Amino acid sequence: MYTLLSVKLKALQKHPTTLLLTYVVVYFIWGLGMNEFGKFMEIARFANWWQVITCYILYMVPISLLLRNKPFFDQYAYGLVAMGILEFMGYWLQTSYAYPDNILAQVFNPLNFSLGMALFFALYFPAGNWLVSKIYHMLFKNNPTLS
């Protein structure tokens, strides 16, 4: 297990700093926006705003980087496992809050709420990788010294 983790950590360290910063900025803004959207629509929210940093930057960015060159389905499938664990832990530890009788619980029923959230948020990995790739190439394609 230690060998696998050290190999994956070394793979993460090979990415250019500008790419890492692009991921951090995009995922941070995305996380803040989704947390605010969840509050506004009274679906779900983090218990603390700074969980955007732990979930989106410290958890999702490294996973996205490891998945970025894989096909869409692989990114989604691995993302589903990652988000299933995250959703389960968030509601179990009560660091995530689901509003009672929210619209998703009404449509899919409360027993399927966190499963639905995991299925939805697993799309973040292929979508996030696509978005970061577009932004990164738009910002840095003409300046190879920055990458």
Image (cartoon, grey):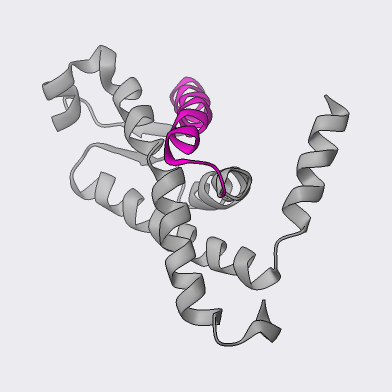
**How many marks can you see?**
0
Residue 48 appears left or right of 123: right
In what quadrant of the picture does the N terminus appear?
top right
Q: Position of residue 66 (x, y in %)?
A: 63, 44
Q: Residue furthest front?
A: 71
Instruction: Name the residue rendered at 54%, 61% in the picture.
Output: 23
The magenta stretch is: 69-92
Instruction: Name the residue rendered at 55%, 49% in the picture.
Output: 68
Residue closer to the observer: 96 or 11: 11
Q: Position of residue 40 (x, y in %)?
A: 20, 50
Q: Residue furthest top?
A: 111
Q: Check the image and report above or below for 145 versus 122.
A: below
Q: Indicate yes or no whether the magenta region holds residue 98.
A: no
Q: Position of residue 67 (x, y in %)?
A: 57, 43
Magenta span dominant secondary structure: helix
Q: Position of residue 123 (x, y in %)?
A: 37, 40
Q: Indicate yes or no whether the magenta region holds residue 87.
A: yes
